[in-house]
């Protein structure tokens, strides 16, 4: 009933995002890996060892199952055991240059089919930014774009989904946010189906508008071994979040999804160091000031 229109939007978003990132890299292209598993089908597009992106993955999947996994029914116990259908586009971009932030985005659709009842559907998604050497002008651009995406759908939408993002992308065991936030939402069915689908489309296209100008501005910034080492160390936080807290990773693994596509978000290189502390007053130490929720668009003073 709903799936054909959602599938068309998702596939077009995957195409647009890949094209926009390829135009920034200029040296490498996404290679398509069309796959089929016991749950469904998908297409993982991965760009490796480009001039700008060390690894970028933009994954589309469409899966079905006989029973909703536990991670998807924690807030909807009435759907436990119901057949389901899920589809989405999820991406994580790991740039080579430490001055270009890592970014993540996803848009997804779920529909459950409880026995003897009408189907229950909802959307989810968002985008967030993880800089290693943050620039306030980049963060302002990111959040202004997020605000503009949300504005046609209600005055409170940006503030609500921005706060949800700050709370979701939070490493509780570290006491810090994963980055500088953006948008996050789940269980979205507050509007009619067509409005919700349009919001998903706008979020996906908004990600391109938010991220590409930052890449273009920072990709030629000179860096050395110190910056590269710090980038690899901070990538470890990304690994920690995705494997410990991320509900999408848990859903994919618990539902028997395709492991290679689920873990496509992992950085190609990462470094762990016991009790690392950046030098006080250094550019690396400055990052700590950004790893806490902040109203980035507040007027000065």
Image (cartoon, rainbow, N blue to C red):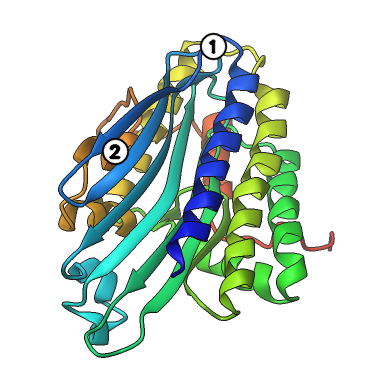
Judge by depth and name the residue closer to the eye, 199 or 12. Answer: 12
Q: Mark 1 points at which residue?
A: 51
Q: Is residue 101 above or below residue 268?
A: below
> Is there CB contact under 8 Å for labels 2 and 1?
no
The image position of residue 101, as x and y in percent, is 56, 33
Label 2, residues with CA under 10 Å away: few <14, some 14-19, many ≥20? many
- Image coordinates for residue 190, horizontal then vertical, percent: 56, 81
Relative side of 206 to 130, left or right? right
Q: Where is residue 279 in the image (x, y as percent from the top left)?
A: 48, 30
Q: Height in image: 223 above or below 19? A: above
Q: Which residue is nearer to you in this view: 264 or 236? A: 264
Residue plotted at (58% across, 22% down): 22
Give the left or right position of residue 126, taking residue 257 as reference.
right
Does dot 1 land on a helix, a strand or a loop?
A: loop
Q: Please state which of residues 4 and 85 is positioned toward the viewer in this rendering.
A: 4
- Provide the secondary structure element on which disc 2 rests: helix
Disc 2/disc 1 C-alpha distance (Å):
23 Å
**Which class describes the residues within 10 Å of circle 1: few (<14), some (14-19), or many (20+)?**
some
Residue at the far right: name it: 300
User: Image quadrant for the C terminus?
Assistant: bottom right
Query: Residue 261 — which label?
Result: 2
Splitting the image into 4 quarters, where does residue 44 fall?
Answer: top left
Chain-order first, disc 2 or disc 1: 1
Residue drawn at x 28%, y 77% as measured from the top left: 113
Measured along the vertical axis of the image, is residue 301 above or below residue 205? below
Q: In this view, does 214 lie to the left or right of 272?
A: right
Between label 2 and label 1, give the one nearer the viewer. Answer: 2
Identify the mark at residue 171; answer none if there is no mark.
none
Q: Quadrant of residue 209?
A: top right
- The residue located at (54%, 19%) in the rendering is 97
Q: What residue do we see at 45% from left, 40% from top?
A: 91
């Amino acid at each position: 009933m709903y799936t054909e229109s959602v599938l068309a939007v998702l596939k077009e978003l995957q195409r647009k995002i890949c094209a926009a990132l390829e135009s920034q890299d200029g040296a490498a292209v996404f290679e398509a890996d069309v796959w089929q598993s016991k749950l469904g089908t998908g297409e993982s597009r991965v760009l490796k060892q480009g001039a700008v992106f060390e690894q970028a993955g933009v994954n589309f999947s469409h899966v079905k199952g006989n029973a909703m996994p536990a991670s998807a029914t924690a807030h909807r116990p009435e759907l436990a055991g119901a057949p389901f259908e899920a589809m989405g586009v999820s991406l994580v971009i790991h740039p080579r240059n430490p001055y270009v932030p890592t970014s993540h985005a996803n848009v997804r659709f779920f529909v459950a089919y409880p026995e003897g009842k009408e189907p229950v559907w909802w959307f989810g998604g968002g985008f967030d930014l993880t800089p290693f050497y943050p620039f306030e002008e980049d963060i302002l651009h990111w959040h202004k774009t997020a605000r503009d995406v949300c504005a046609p759908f209600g005055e409170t939408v940006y503030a609500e989904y921005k706060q949800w993002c700050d709370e979701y992308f939070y490493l509780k065991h570290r006491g810090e946010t994963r980055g500088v936030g953006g948008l996050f939402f789940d269980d979205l069915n507050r509007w009619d189906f067509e409005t919700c689908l349009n919001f998903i489309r706008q979020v996906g296209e908004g990600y391109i508008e938010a991220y590409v100008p930052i890449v273009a501005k920072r990709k030629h910034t000179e860096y050395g071994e110190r910056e590269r080492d710090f980038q690899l160390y901070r990538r470890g936080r990304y690994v920690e979040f995705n494997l410990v807290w991320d509900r999408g990773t848990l859903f994919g693994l618990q539902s028997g999804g395709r492991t290679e596509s689920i873990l496509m978000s992992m950085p190609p290189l990462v470094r762990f160091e016991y009790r690392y502390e950046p030098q006080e007053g250094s550019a690396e130490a400055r990052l700590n000031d950004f790893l806490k929720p902040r109203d980035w668009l507040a007027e000065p003073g």
